[in-house]
Every structure is written in C-alpha cells, then in structure tokens.
Amino acid sequence: MSEVNALAQRIDALLPQTQCTKCGYAGCRPYADAIASGQASYNQCPPGGAEGVERLANLLGRPVIPLNPENGVERPRPRAVIDESLCIGCTLCIQACPVDAIVGAAKLMHTVIEDRCTGCDLCVPPCPVDCIDMVPVTGERTGWDAWSQTQADQARAHFETHQARLDKDKAEREARLAARTARVAAGTQAVQTVENGETRVAQAVTTTSPVSHGGTDASAKPLLATDKANEADEAAAAAARKQAIIQAALERARQKKAALAAEGLGPKNTQNVSASVQAQIDEAEARRKRLGIGTGAGGTTPTPDDDANET
C-alpha cells in the first residue's frame, strides 16, 4: 500500500461516514483520498464539525482552521421523516439513500429505519412530492458530540453493503444484456441461414411445407396482424391507466401539501443544496424525460417499473 493510500485510510477512519457528499466528493472515502493527495482541504466536512477538523488537523500536522462555510454548517444531527400521507411510492428516495436506511415497495408507502439514517439529506431533493422532512434529533449536540465512532463504523458497513449490492446488480444487468445480445445475434444468423438455403433442413422445409416465403401460412397473416393490433391496444390502455394513477397520486399529494401550507405546517425541504446533490436531481429529471413521464400539477415522477426497464 502506498503512503498516500495509507494516509487516506487513516483520514477515512476519522470521518463520520454519513456519505452526505457535502464535502464536494461522492462519499467519505473519496474525500479522504482527495485530502491525502492534496486535492482537498481538511475543513470540508460539516457533519464532523469543528472537532472533525481538529482531528484531521492533528493527524496531518496542520493548524486547526474553521469549517469551510461553502460546504455547510455544523448542526444538530437530523433524521429523515417521511410523511406517509403524501408518499406516492416512487422509490427515488430509496435509490438516493447511501446506507439503505429507507424501505418500501413500488407505489406503496416508504419508511425510514431510524437507527440507520445518517442525516445526509440526499433523499430530500429527489422526492417529487416533498414528503420528506429532516428533523433534528440530538438537541443542542452537534458534530461529533451528536455522533459516535460506533455509529460511524456501522454507517461505513451499511454503505459498503449498499455499494456491493449496486455493483452486483450492475454486473447482473450487463450479463443479461450480453446474453440478450448473443440470443439476438444467434437468431439473426439462423434466419439468414434459412433464407439463404445454406442447410439441408432449410431446403427440406422450403420444398415440403406449404408456407409462404416468410415462413408463415398466408391464411395466418390476417390473424397474426389482428393479434398484434390487440396487444398494442392493450399495452396502450395499460400505459394510460398507469399514467392516470401517477397523476392522481401527484394531485392528491399537491392538495395535501396546499392544505398543510395553509395551516403553516408545510414540509421544510432543504435549500441551497450542494453541487453533487444538484447533480443527482438533474440526473433524476433527465431519467424522467427519457422515460416520457408526463407533467402533472404536482410535478413528475417515474414509476419503479419504468425505471427498471430503462436500458
């Protein structure tokens, strides 16, 4: 292990492992790598706060400096709370959570596992109905006073498990795509073999079977066309029903939000998000556009089924 990697490992051990990206990097370890290589300062971790800066300064033999306000402020530790009456089950918050602290199913209510939530805020911006609030749960305690080394170690383990699952899912998707490509290629080759009469089996079928050149009895063509038209109509109707359900859920959520706002109880979303979080929002919006999900009064959201089918 090189000296830089060894130093990065020691730095990572002093970070709170919230994986919040407020430091400007994709997680705690990438930030540790950046500090070790001299690409980032050691005062960019709001969850670690002033004590976190002091810990890193002592390790690096550098002076203690204030937390960089561009990365955020030290604050009491929050926990994500989902308004179950507003949640439409879009799963975008589940996808955003770096430690798998949110559970739920497509089109059903989601909930937060309290002991797992690191207060990273990453689930808030992607929510299309603003049903997630970050609630302080540590009173006046901030930074490392509101967090423990045990919690940090557990958060790191959850994050690593999360990343391993994502890597496994990606490998499986790529394997399925490769297998599908191979099947298509094999099917194309087989069709070409039959059409060119390169095998005796193809010749025998051509001379003995009363079929058209397309390989199908001409009398069956109208029936096949009718079946395909019916399937297309059914698919279009199913898509329309799904879209109607989405828009109805968004409208209900919009009305509920308006009622809460009138009572002064509207959701308190995070403001002035970091560039990395904004990138997540932009990616979610781009995915919605690619999936062709329409815009309703309450915004847009793809369904998990659509997202799963995206290639």
Image: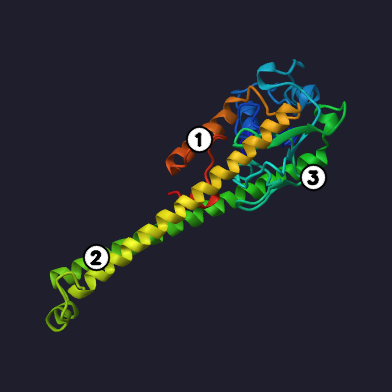
Q: Residue 49, located in which quarter of the rendered image?
A: top right
Dot 3 lies on which element? loop
How far, Cα to Cα, is label 1 from label 3?
A: 30 Å
Tag 3: Cα neighbours inside 10 Å, few (<14), some, or many (≥20)?
Answer: few
Residue type at mark 2 is Gln
Q: CA distance from mark 2 to mark 1?
A: 40 Å
Asked if the residues shown at circle 2 and circle 1 are in contact, with their CB atoms under 8 angstroms apart, the answer is no
| Rendering coords of residue 87 (x, y %) | 66, 43
Taking the view exactly as shown, the residue that stands out farthest to the left is: 207
Q: Earlier in the sequence, mark 1 or mark 3?
A: 3
Q: Nearer the viewer, residue 78 or 111?
A: 111
Residue type, numbered disc 3: Asp
Quadrant housing the N terminus: top right
Circle 1 is placed at which residue position?
285
Is there CB contact under 8 Å for labels 2 and 3?
Answer: no
Residue 227, horizontal then vertical, whole percent: 32, 67
Marks 2 and 3, the one that precedes in the sequence: 3
At horizontal 29% and vertical 66% (from top left) the residue drawn is: 226
What label does residue 115 carry, if any? Answer: 3
What residue do we see at 59% from left, 40% from top?
Answer: 250
Distance, label 2 to label 3, CA atoms, is 55 Å
Label 2 or label 3, whichever lies nearer to me, is 3
Which residue type carries mark 1?
Glu
* Any part of residue 9 in sight: no
Q: Is residue 209 left or right of residue 136?
A: left
User: Which residue is identified by label 2?
Assistant: 189
